[in-house]
Image: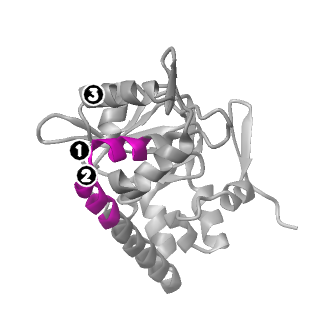
Amino acid sequence: MREQVILRSGGQMETLDSIIDTLAPDSLLRALSRVQLEGLLAKSNRRELKKGDVLINQGDEEGDFAVYLLSGALKISFVSAGGREIILNYCAPNELVGEIALLDSGPRTATVTAVVPSAVLLLPTQAFLETVSNNPASVVGVMRELARRVRQLNLVVESDRTFSMGPRLARALVRLIDRNREDGELIYNPSQNDLGAFAGLARENVSRLLTEWEAQEVIERKGRALVVRDIEYLELLAEFGDDG
């Protein structure tokens, strides 16, 4: 039986097997074989982040690593030409961030920030490229995953152009519901500014919609925390828009 390599930090530990077994289903890393993944992860470095720590800055010249999230949460955002922050996504444990850098080592297109205390692995770009180049099947797997993501992005962009403000905010809230709880509370406890940046809406519109939905008992506010009381309503609104 082979010996597992263990990654340790701050009293926590993860084996390579446990990381590989919990990779997100759509992770770019799944294009690699298990042996290849073990070799790549063994060359990675672990880093602990405090809330608010910026791991990657938009515009950084060299993307020489990708980020695998072990625990916590990361916010992926960028600043538009008009100076407005746009939140692209929130990354949950077992997901990969900054994977474009694994392919082109170009300037960073987004900023990655820890929204809660988090632990990450930094995967070196050079090690990934060497791993993939040694196995043509891995190259095909990477291309298929990238094609799938382009298709998915096209669908998101098209729906954002079509949907009005209510459905767009509903989509953001549905994506942020903590599925590990049964009370409908949101993960990361986003501010109205963050919700607006995530849904592509002005904060004033977010505030108005939340007030309307609170009166309709769709959501409830508990201090700064937001709780979804009618998940089915928001899911229908998010999927079908105002015609649902």
Q: Residue 208: x percent and y percent?
A: 30, 26
The prevailing secondary structure element of the residues shown in magenta is: helix
Distance (Cα) linking label 2 and label 1: 5 Å
* Magenta-colored stretch includes residue 157: yes
Residue highlighted by disc 2: 107
Mark 2 secondary-structure assignment: loop
Please tell me which of labels 2 and 3 falls first in the chain. Answer: 2
The answer to whether residue 170 is above or below residue 20 is above
How many C-alpha atoms fall within 10 Å of the one at disc 2: few (<14), some, or many (≥20)? some
Mark 1 secondary-structure assignment: loop
Q: Residue at x 45, y 79 (%)?
A: 139
Please tell me which of labels 2 and 1 falls first in the chain. Answer: 1
Q: Residue at x 30, y 66 (%)?
A: 154
Q: Residue at x 46, y 30 (%)?
A: 216
Distance (Cα) linking label 1 and label 3: 26 Å
Q: Which mark is residue 59?
A: 1
The answer to whether residue 45 is above or below residue 21 is above
* Magenta-colored stretch includes residue 26: no
Residue highlighted by disc 3: 203
How many C-alpha atoms fall within 10 Å of the one at disc 3: few (<14), some, or many (≥20)? some
Q: Residue 218: x percent and y percent?
A: 49, 33
State the image quarter where residue 12 is shown: top right
Label pair 2/3, CB-CB below 8 angstroms: no
In the image, which residues are magenta? 154-172
Mark 3 secondary-structure assignment: helix
